[in-house]
């Protein structure tokens, strides 16, 4: 690798517990003979954090700490729910970042690496980014912007934070946009270098880009919020492409509770990383789509998974069991996306080709979810009456060919207060699995409801 002279820096206003992990990750960074200096602008309100920066400078002997004077209303609220920025503080941060860029240009650094102080880096990050030979490239990280939500990347494709490809003259449905967004996020989970429209927080910038005039200063006629967006739009206007390298994602300590995950990140690396060669190799085209759909589901990208599963079905050449399994997955994806009725419609459309116990049981279960007990019973009876195929033990849901429709009808009849019928079907289900705890519990309940003794299960027809 050619000789590089690198300046690492950024504005720092951080809690000591978070800053400690950031600085330790910089100490662990592999530099491979690169000449590295540091420039931090100390904007801390906590004296302990300020002391930590000074100690880092003494320990490395390569760091310059510049104290940022306080000015005006600089209240910055950061809690376990979210971060709350004031407009004035954003442009103050922009000015501090631009000061670092100007210093790097003046002192003839080949690159500057701007790093937010709430990140923890893989030690291989810098060598990887430098090896990409890009003028502007960021490492990736993921954040739950709100507690309990899907983790999102800090890069985007266009606009303020759009994660689907730009299509100016084509109107897409919300489902299509969601699927495209999820496909982009899924791509980011495959190690590689990808062109993006926006990035920030851990960005390597070349001297060429600095000389071209990239900076964070506000573009007055641009309404987008945040200094990173103004940086990215200015870069694009200057003819500079933006890239993200997803090989070694950083860890984001966005809220205090995220500190608990730092040790696991250091010990095990990025546990969302996928081996691109492993998942792209082997198998027919349809199977590749199916495997990719399952990986998307594991990431929570249900709309994207639906598209992959539909492609799997359209390619054809699959076994009936494989197609039924795909249809059940499609229905489940719709359910997790809040569109259970669309899952039902998809199963109903498939019944022309696949009249199987698995699909009948799924349709019955969907009726139960809406308390449509009579319709559910009709579907479960169809499951019972359907002749088993020779390879039924290869089924994606073996129980659909055995005890499941019986226990489900027991539940339906119980909700209709038809306890005798409920008892009969529960007993028929027990023939397949005499030790089934749910059906044994049903038996006890129904016997109490049916005193004196119920009629034998074999005495009535289905």
Image (cartoon, rainbow, N blue to C red):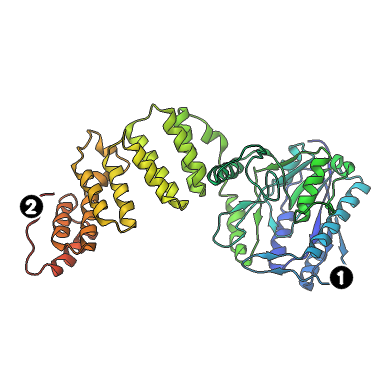
Where's residue 254, x and y in %?
A: 65, 61
User: Which residue matches tag 2?
Assistant: 458
Name which residue lies at 31% across and 47% down: 363
Q: For numbered disc 2, what is the local secondary structure?
A: helix
Where's residue 23, x and y in %?
A: 74, 59
Name which residue lies at 41% across and 50% down: 340
Which of the 4 image quarters holds residue 45?
A: bottom right
Where's residue 52, x and y in %?
A: 78, 66
> Crowding near pointer 1: few (<14 within 10 Å), some, many (20+)?
few
Q: Nearer the viewer, residue 316 or 210?
A: 316
Is any part of residue 459 visible from this angle?
yes
Q: Residue 71, which numbered label? A: 1
Q: Nearer the viewer, residue 408 or 279?
A: 408
Q: Quadrant of the N terminus?
A: top right
Name which residue lies at 13% across and 49% down: 462
Q: For numbered disc 1, what is the local secondary structure?
A: loop
Q: Is residue 329 above or below residue 226?
A: above
CA distance for labels 1 and 2: 86 Å
Outermost residue, right direction? 106
Q: Residue 210, which numbered label? A: none
Where's residue 220, x and y in %?
A: 85, 54
**Going by the image, does 350 lie left or right of 15?**
left
Is any part of residue 61 visible from this angle?
no
**Going by the image, does 250 lie left or right of 348?**
right
**Going by the image, does 295 lie left or right of 387?**
right
Which of the 4 image quarters holds residue 457?
A: bottom left
């Amino acid at each position: 690798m050619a000789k590089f002279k690198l300046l690492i820096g950024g504005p720092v206003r951080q809690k000591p517990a978070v800053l400690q992990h950031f600085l330790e990750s910089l100490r662990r960074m592999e530099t491979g003979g690169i000449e590295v200096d540091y420039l931090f602008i100390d904007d801390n309100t906590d004296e302990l954090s300020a002391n930590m920066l000074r100690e880092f400078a003494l320990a490395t002997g390569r760091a310059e700490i510049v104290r940022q004077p306080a000015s005006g209303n600089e209240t910055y609220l950061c809690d376990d729910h979210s971060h709350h920025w004031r407009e004035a503080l954003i442009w103050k941060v922009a000015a501090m970042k631009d000061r670092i860029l100007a210093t790097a240009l003046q002192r003839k650094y080949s690159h500057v690496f701007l790093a937010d102080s709430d990140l923890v880096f893989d030690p291989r990050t810098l060598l990887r980014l430098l090896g990409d030979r890009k003028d502007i490239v960021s490492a990736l990280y993921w954040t739950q912007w709100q507690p309990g939500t899907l983790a999102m990347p800090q890069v985007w494709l266009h606009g303020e934070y759009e994660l689907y490809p730009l299509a100016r003259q084509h109107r897409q449905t919300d489902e299509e946009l969601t699927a495209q967004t999820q496909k982009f996020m899924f791509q980011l989970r495959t190690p590689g270098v990808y062109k993006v429209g926006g990035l920030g927080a851990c960005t390597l910038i070349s001297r060429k880009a600095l000389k071209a005039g990239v900076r964070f200063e506000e573009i007055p006629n641009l309404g987008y919020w945040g200094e990173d967006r103004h940086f990215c739009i200015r870069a694009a206007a200057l003819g500079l492409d933006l890239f993200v390298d997803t090989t070694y994602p950083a860890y984001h300590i966005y809220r205090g509770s995220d500190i608990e995950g730092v040790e696991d990140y250091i010990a095990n690396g990025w546990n969302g990383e996928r081996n691109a060669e492993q998942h792209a190799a082997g198998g027919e085209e349809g199977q590749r789509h199916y495997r990719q759909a399952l990986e998307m589901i594991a990431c929570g990208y249900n709309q994207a998974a639906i598209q992959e599963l539909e492609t799997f079905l359209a390619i054809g050449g699959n076994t009936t069991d494989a197609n039924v399994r795909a249809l059940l997955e499609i229905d489940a994806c719709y359910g997790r996306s809040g569109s259970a009725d669309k899952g039902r419609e998809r199963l109903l459309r498939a019944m022309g080709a696949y009249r199987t116990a698995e699909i009948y049981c799924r349709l019955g279960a969907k009726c139960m979810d809406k308390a449509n007990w009579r319709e559910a019973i009709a579907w479960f009876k169809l499951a019972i009456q359907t002749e088993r195929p020779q390879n039924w033990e290869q089924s994606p849901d073996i129980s659909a060919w055995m005890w499941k429709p019986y226990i489900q009808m027991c539940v339906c009849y119980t909700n209709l207060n038809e306890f005798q019928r409920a008892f009969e079907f529960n007993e028929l289900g027990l023939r397949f699995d005499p030790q089934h705890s749910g059906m044994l519990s049903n038996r006890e309940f129904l016997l109490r409801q049916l005193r004196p003794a119920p009629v034998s299960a074999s005495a009535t027809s289905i």
